[in-house]
């Protein structure tokens, strides 16, 4: 299993999101203090970024 720390700047709101990225035989798992996102191992970087942005906006900025 490989573990990394990743930081992303959210362009829509300017927030900085820090997450742990874990890779195992099932794919990728992104962990923040508030949510977890699982992605298959054949996903593109673009799809991952778009998914993180969508989850962040839905959970952190819901009206």
Image (cartoon, helix red, strand yellow):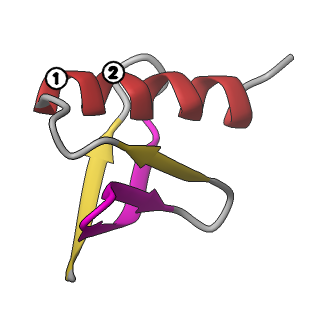
Q: CA distance from mark 1 to mark 2?
A: 6 Å
Residue wearing tag 1: 46
User: Which residue occupies 15% across, 36% down?
Assistant: 42
The residue under the point 53% across, 62% down is: 32
* Residue 33 in the figure: left or right of residue 52: right
Mark 2 is surrounded, within 10 Å at the Cα level, by few (under 14), some (14 to 19) or many (20 or more) other residues, namely: few
Q: Going by the image, does 35 lie left or right of 1?
A: right
Q: Is 62 left or right of 12, judged from the image as shown?
A: right
Relative horizontal placement of residue 23, taking residue 37 as reference (left or right)? left
- Please, is residue 53 above or below residue 37 in the view? above
**Which of the labelled discs sits on residue 50, or is there none?**
2
Q: Main secondary structure of the magenta part?
A: strand
Q: Please state, as top left, top right, bottom left or bottom right, where the N terminus lies in the image.
A: bottom left
User: What SS does tag 2 mark?
Assistant: helix
> Given the current orientation, which residue lies at the most extreme right position?
63
For the record, the magenta segment spans 14-31
The quarter holding residue 12 reads top left
Disc 1 vs disc 2: Cβ atoms closer than 8 Å?
yes
Q: Position of residue 10 (x, y in %)?
A: 37, 31
């Amino acid at each position: 299993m490989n573990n990394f720390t990743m930081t992303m700047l959210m362009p829509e709101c300017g927030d900085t999101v820090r997450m742990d990225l874990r890779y195992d035989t099932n794919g990728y798992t992104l962990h923040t203090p508030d949510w977890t996102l699982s992605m298959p191992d054949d996903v593109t970087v673009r799809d991952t970024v778009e998914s993180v942005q969508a989850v962040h906006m839905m959970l952190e900025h819901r009206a």
